[in-house]
Image: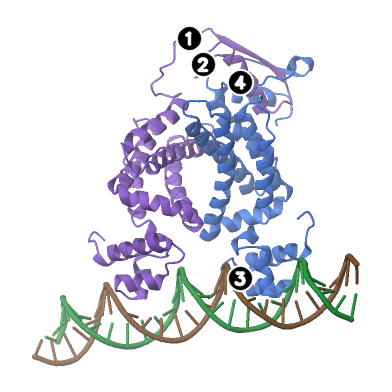
Chain colours: A purple, B blue, C green, D brown
Amino acid sequence: MTTKPPMRDALVAAAFQLFLERGYEAATIDDIVALAGVGRRSFFRYFPSKEDVVFPDHERALADMTRFLEASADGDDPVARVCDAARLVLGMYAENPTFSVQRYRLTKQVPGLRAYELSVVWRYERALADYLGARYADRPDGKLRADVIAAAVVAAHNNGLRTWLRSGAEGDAGAAVDHALEFVRAAWNGEGATRQGPPEAEDDVVIVITKRRTPMWRVVREIEAGLAEEGSPT
Amino acid sequence: MTTKPPMRDALVAAAFQLFLERGYEAATIDDIVALAGVGRRSFFRYFPSKEDVVFPDHERALADMTRFLEASADGDDPVARVCDAARLVLGMYAENPTFSVQRYRLTKQVPGLRAYELSVVWRYERALADYLGARYADRPDGKLRADVIAAAVVAAHNNGLRTWLRSGAEGDAGAAVDHALEFVRAAWNGEGATRQGPPEAEDDVVIVITKRRTPMWRVVREIEAGLAEEGSPT
DNA sequence: GCTGCCATGGCATCGAGTACCCTCAATTAT
DNA sequence: ATAATTGAGGGTACTCGATGCCATGGCAGC
């Protein structure tokens, strides 16, 4: 498990060579194994499906992320921890910039690969949401909060990552993702984190009068409208 | 396109019957078409893949959502509009509760279907993000904001939807999703909220007094507590 | 009549994925 | 040293989803 079999790398190299010069669907498994000089059966020993050869290291990255989240202390901010976990995944992309860009262009134009990437990203998101769900276990809407924040963090990460990939992996990937993640942190900075807003008077109150049967989302919308009237809308 | 071919419905019914009594993978296309009494080739005329028969109406729902977003006026709040678009999708699930629950249980335990559902949800999310991206075109981080909010709305919608589905489609689906979406709205408040008619015209009212910086979830909980005090919760 | 048109059905084929069995080398036991 | 075991790699046949091509059959319109 710790040793790196050369056959696996040979299969990835052969596969990407054919995918790039001939397209993903046009390159068959037989073509790949013929180019790599191995038997057809051996391909499926190393990759459970044809799509897996395009994401050869996500299994390891997912394990790394899970371990990182499990090593979290109870003292640190959950949102910050999750953002750091996302940065961990970014590191894997940044290790091989050219490979990441090739895969990005491939994934963008092959629907099957895009669908597979979604299932990969979904597992990352579930890892984040499960961690947050445990940290927010005592909150009223802990699971909901966990799901939404995890989705937001993943979306921000992907936004920064894709911006970097679209540019051909020039510039600093970490900067783009840090900027995107900061956007999420700013939206949910409420709890024990750094509260940088201007100090307001404690006796500043809001009075809400509403019908009993009004949907809750409409009530809150009105509250926000009242807040935005003279306050600081972030 | 407007006419409903009975053969399509027959295929869906036959497919679900076999999926439920035998499992998804164990039921082959030949079994389905044999049960439906049609030719094998006809299946792929109505459904491009085996997975599509499990989500027979998402194509229409996606078109409905796109149309709904295109019909948006420049005056209304983008986030509210996107939340309403999500509620539109919920309506499709609520139309056939038993069917939705069956599909939910099927999708939960078949990895292939879960992956396919992700690609479906991804298209919804892209529609929302594209709409928000256009509305936030003049903002500094418009695309980023659009991606993050779209992901949060979808995550909240799915959280509420799955809560409802897990309960066997008992109770009000709209209430669960409204509550979840309100959570997202609370995070990204501000910007041009439309205030409609003043609510003090009705006699049955609820009055809430709270401090300005109180977290929104706490306010909502107080309101709901006040509602449950003597009236009908929800 | 005849002529397109369209929905359907019937093969034939391709390619991904799997099950089963074979070979060969290295190791270990006797 | 020889036999037995183990494990990586290879080969073959099969299943099944998916596509392409063509035949059939009803149903306009003139």
Task: Compute the Cα span from label 3 to label 1.
Answer: 64 Å
Is B168 drawn above or below residue D18 in the view shown?
above
* Mark 2 on the same chain as mark 1: no
Q: Callout 4: helix, strand or loop?
A: loop
Q: Which mark is residue B213?
A: 2
Which one is in front in this view, the residue at disc 4 or the one at disc 2? 4
What residue is disc 3 on? Answer: B27
Tell me which chain the residue with mark 3 is part of: B
Q: Position of residue B67 (x, y in %)?
A: 69, 41
Where does residue B1 sit, x and y in percent of width and height?
75, 55
The answer to which quarter of the image holds residue B134 is: top right
Q: Amino acid at mark 2?
A: Arg
Tell me the distance, in whole angstroms, between the alpha carbons under discs 4 and 2: 20 Å
Which mark lies nearer to you, 3 or 2? 3
Q: CA distance from mark 4 to mark 1?
A: 22 Å
- In the picture, the quarter occupied by the C terminus of chain B is top right
- Would you name the residue on which mark 4 appears? B192
Asked if labels 1 and 2 touch by Cβ distance under 8 angstroms, the answer is yes
Q: Mark 4 or mark 1: which is in front?
A: 4
Where is residue A101? Give x, y as percent: 36, 49
Q: Residue under mark 2: which chain is it in?
A: B
The amino acid type found where label 4 is placed reads: Gly
Residue on which disc 1 sits: A200
Q: Amino acid at mark 1?
A: Glu
Question: Left or right of B108: which side holds A177?
Answer: left
Q: Position of residue A215 (x, y in %)?
A: 69, 28
The nearer-to-camera label among 3 and 4 is 4
